[in-house]
Amino acid sequence: MARKYKIALLPGDGIGREVISEARRVLDEVITWIDGLEMEIHEFDCGGEYFLRTNREWSEEAEDFTKTEADAVLFGGIGAIGPDGKTVRRPDGNLAGYSVVIGLRHELDLYANVRPVKLFEGVPTPLVSKGPKDIDMVVVRENTEGLYYPARGRVKESDRDFAYDLRIITTRGSERIARYAFDLAMTRNGAPVDGRRRVTCVDKSNLLAGCQLFRETFTRVGEEYKETSKDYAYVDAWTLLAIRKPEYYDVVVAPNEFGDIISDLGAALQGGLGVAPSGNIGVKHAVFEPVHGSAPDIAGTGKANPIAAILSMAMMFEWLGKNHDDAVSIRTAEKIRNSVELVLHEGRIRTPDLCLGEWSGVVPSTTQQVTDEVIRKMKG
Ligand code: ATP
């Protein structure tokens, strides 16, 4: 049944602001176009630039709404450069905006970081012998534990100086991410190579105790999914395999830090950060964001590709639709994704990051021109 969703938009810094304002244009269009889609959009400043102005990472109102009222969150990216030419940081050394990105993951228990790695027609991949029929997997990264759990420190004494990062992996955390990965595989068409549903556990269990627990739990949970094949790879070997035979992979699940690294490899395979969307998903809450950050080097130049942000918004609609059994929202996700696919496939309108290979002769378009074209396709 259709319902009214409350959405928090958090553009953040640099190109985060630019691509979220483009996603918003698409959002405003779909709201007027799609019958029965009702949204209440609340947009808030946050991040390093906001911190420079106010000494806060976001307002109390923004924090309160995002944590307690929003049905879903669409986020851009944080990371600002201060007047001294350095990255803006909080007094504790963390990036200004840390509470928004990392804080939300912990406070809202967004345990699954989901990164689809799909190569669309019309997008150049660095793998010369592979094409869209070969690259269609999803990396599911555990998002709340592992090496990025904030249990770290530095010891400086007269005769020694060292730092430590504790890597905590729990049975509960491993179990729920494994289950998420197997459930996700049930909704997909299997791996490109053979159409088999396959979930690959990527770890370093030949060495690390946490990874042994992660793998054992994966195997136990996987027993419940008889029609899905369980597959295993050590993370170092996986990076090689993913380049040699990406078509073998369907859903790939990994502990936090390994998932972070391998999903950037995935972003490269699918054509770069400009087209890589993601979702941070929990039981009741979810934050969707492009994989890229604030990219200060291209901020303000009109070169930022808005597609990663627009596809992240499509993921948001899909999640809302599935969570609320809402066909209108699912249809909206499909509409947005199809329009993006058409623009990429046609190939005339693209930002400079995609003007490579057989598209190197295309005159690059601006961020806004790409969005204009996505909207035109949606209407057409
Ligand atoms: P962090 O991920 O730590 O926030 P960052 O903000 O420095 O890093 P990213 O935003 O991840 O950098 O981007 C790395 C590089 O990729 C950028 O310098 C930029 O050139 C390119 N890039 C990232 N996003 C896009 C995009 N949407 N369109 C075009 N190029 C992009």
Image (cartoon, rainbow, N blue to C red):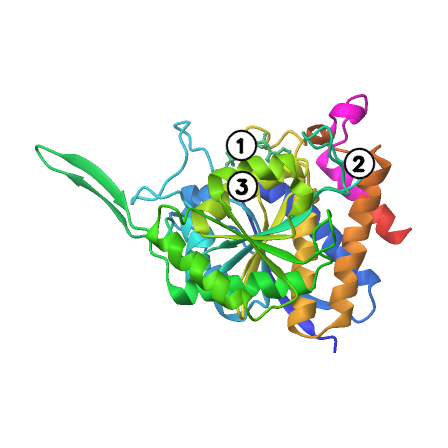
Furthest-left residue in view? 158
Residue 375 in the image: state x and y as whole percent.
82, 48
Residue type for callout 1: Pro
Q: Local crowd at mark 3 within 10 Å, few (<14), some, or many (≥20)?
A: some
User: What range of the chain is rendered magenta?
Assistant: 355-373
* Mark 1 residue element: loop
Looking at mark 1, is its residue's CB closer than 8 Å to ligand 1? yes
Q: Residue at x 67, y 54 (%)?
A: 313
Please tell me the numbered disc located at residue 238: 3
Relative side of 288 to 346, left or right = left
Q: Is residue 288 above or below residue 17?
A: below
- Which of the four quarters of the rendered structure image does ligand 1 lie in? top right
Q: Local crowd at mark 2 within 10 Å, few (<14), some, or many (≥20)?
A: many
Tell me the quadrant of the picture where the N terminus can be found.
bottom right
Q: Are marks 1 and 3 in contact (CB under 8 Å)?
A: no
Please tell me the numbered disc located at residue 296: 1
Mark closest to the chain's N terminus, 1 or 3: 3
Report how far apart the C-alphas of labels 1 and 3 lie in the structure. 31 Å
Query: 184 or 22: nearer the eye?
Result: 184
Mark closest to the chain's N terminus, 2 or 1: 2
Report how far apart the C-alphas of labels 2 and 1 lie in the structure. 27 Å
Residue type for callout 2: Gly
Q: Which residue position is annotated with label 2? A: 122
Relative side of 224 to 144, left or right = right
